[in-house]
Amino acid sequence: MPHDSAAANRRVLIVDDDLEFANHLSVGLRGLGYHTALATTSNAMAAAAAAEFRPAIMICDIACFVGGETSEPGVPIPTHIGMARRSDMETAIRAMRQGAVDFFDKDSALIEVAAILDHCFDKRERRDPDQNGIEMLWRAKEAAEEASRTKSEFLATVSHELRTPLNAIIGFSEIISHGFFGQPGHPKYIEYARDISLAGRELHGKIGDILEFANVEAGRHPIALTPVDVAGVAATCVDEMAGRAFSRRIELGVVQMTDAPASADTRAVKRALSNLLCNALNFTPDGGKVRVEIVEDENAVIARVRDSGRGFSEDEAERAGEAFATFERVGSITGLGLGLAIATTLAERMGGEMVLVRNQSLGTTAELRLKKA
């Protein structure tokens, strides 16, 4: 049976000189929710009825099939279904050649006729321009998601394959630099081995970022929302960055203005804040300031990471947060451009958001906004 919402559009014109049968079929189809009208097999009568009633489907006796000749200019061509009593294959084939898409025997049960009509209506609706547009958008969305999954899986696979030999490079270079099996023949070899180890560790860290980004983007890191003490997590992150800040005379601290818990995942919050702090330290000149403020508004607990660096230009602010977006700064450390992208993705997965406040003359403020618990 057709859906009620679609019944008004399910108009069926029955074209048959056997008025008793046509009336019987019309009453039956109306009982199933279809809108029906009748016409004789005269081309003029059928065309006039089609122009006035504008059916989506026309059922016509195939012995006198009228096909597309019933259409007038500007009137959509209906789908044609043939019918006959005790029809033979030759008659059915002739009707199909004239434009019928299906046919049924007049002795068929009403439910069988309804099944044929539903099938034809479904095909018409799929051809509808609006429906086609929605379907195309849906397919494009699925294709984009599949491409994103493929990209993430590729990054994860490549990163994993690179880490394995890199671990060996780092390990053997450290064995040489420490002289575990005897001192190398020349002091330069020790120096080179240490350089290899340092470069390997830096590369290992970048590959780790790529792998984490791929896993986060693919949703492989489970998120368990619980009440989280954001201020406590921020204090832990600041403690871990204290040595790095001290070595560059950067003032680093936490200002807690609320103890309200957030509905979040502790590990995800820690990773997001660590990335924001790392970015802030990277883009803050020696002797600058980086501060984490924990505040709240009506709906969210907010962790603000402020720095005294150069800040973002308008063009840079639009790209900030995109994967692999990097910004050159004199005297600053430039990474892969994944820190903010990972933080943004984690924030969204926790039901929060990342907001970047641009102020090129006064540094940058990155806000991790999380729902209150």
Image (spheres, rainbow, N blue to C red):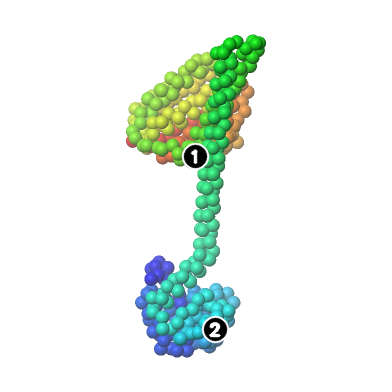
Give me the residue at 43% from left, 79% from top.
Answer: 36
> Which residue matches tag 2?
90
The image quarter containing residue 362 is top right
In the image: residue 272, left or right of residue 66: left
The numbered dot on residue 347 is none
Report the residue marked by disc 1: 217
In the picture, residue 373 is in which quadrant? top left
The quarter of the picture where the N terminus appears is bottom left
Residue 312, image x, y percentages? 57, 31
Q: Is residue 17 above or below residue 336?
A: below
From the top left corner, tell me how far across and down residue 28 is, in percent.
37, 80
Amino acid at circle 1:
Glu
SS type, badge 2: helix
Write the residue at 49% across / 39% down.
Answer: 217
**Do residues under tags 2 and 1 come within 8 Å of each other at their CB atoms?**
no
Residue drawn at x 50%, y 33% as measured from the top left: 212
Visible residue check, residue 308? no
Q: Please determine whether, in this image, residue 213 is positioned above or below residue 2.
A: above
Q: Residues within 10 Å of mark 2 (few under 14, many from 20)?
A: few
The tally of labels here is 2
Q: Secondary structure at mark 1?
A: helix
Residue 170 in view? yes
Amino acid type of the residue tagged 2 in the rendering: Glu
Report the residue that reaches farthest toward the front. 181
Q: Position of residue 274 (x, y in %)?
A: 47, 27
**Residue name at image x 39 percent, y 78 percent:** 110
Q: Is residue 227 left or right of residue 369?
A: left
Q: Position of residue 181 (x, y in %)?
A: 56, 13
**Which of pointers 2 and 1 indicates the residue nearer the eye?**
2
